[in-house]
Amino acid sequence: VLEGTITIALIDDNEFVLVCGSEPQVFTEGSNEAILISLGLSLTDLDADHSITGTEISITNPNNGDELNINTNSELAVAKESTVIYITGNAQSIEYQALLQTLSYISTADE
């Protein structure tokens, strides 16, 4: 079982509440099966405008073969590197929440 941290940072937003499910997601090395890491994620924007302009999602201390994936069939712009995803576009928090709920992790390493 690997332990790691996924960081989700909202851009240009001062007040928000981000809650992920209380149960940790378990990834089995060598399984080559992606896991949804954002089950139960909810995002509440506390600003008066309820608008978010972007987010950066990254793995802290990634290992070789680590990869983040997210649904790219969205009106929001998604740019992806293996362990970092950038999402941009002015949208309501509910739209960002729906997209973030598709976030998954996989590792192709046999470590």
Image (spheres, grey):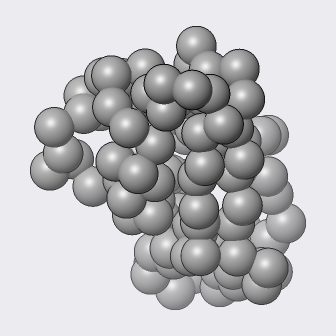
Q: Position of residue 44 (x, y in %)?
A: 60, 49
> Up-down: is 98 above or below 73?
below
Residue 63 seen from this side: no
Q: Is residue 38 visible?
A: yes
For image coordinates 48% across by 25% down, the residue present is: 49
Is 66 positioned to the left or the right of 86 in the image? right
Q: In the picture provided, is 109 more to the left or to the right than 59?
A: left
Q: Quadrant of the N terminus?
A: bottom right
The one of 84 and 48 positioned closer to us in this rendering: 48
From the viewer's side, name the closer residue of 28 and 37: 37
Indicate the quadrant where residue 15 lies. top right
Residue pictured at 24% horizontal, 33% vertical: 76
Q: Which quadrant of the rendered structure holds the C terminus?
A: bottom right
> Among all residues in the image, which is located at the extreme front?
48
**Image coords of residue 61 (percent x, y):** 79, 40
Horizontal and vertical percent position of residue 75: 16, 37
Asked whether, in this view, residue 36 is left or right of residue 58, the answer is: left
Determine the residue positioned at 58% across, 52% down: 43
Q: Position of residue 104 (x, y in %)?
A: 47, 64
Image: 31 above or below 67 = below
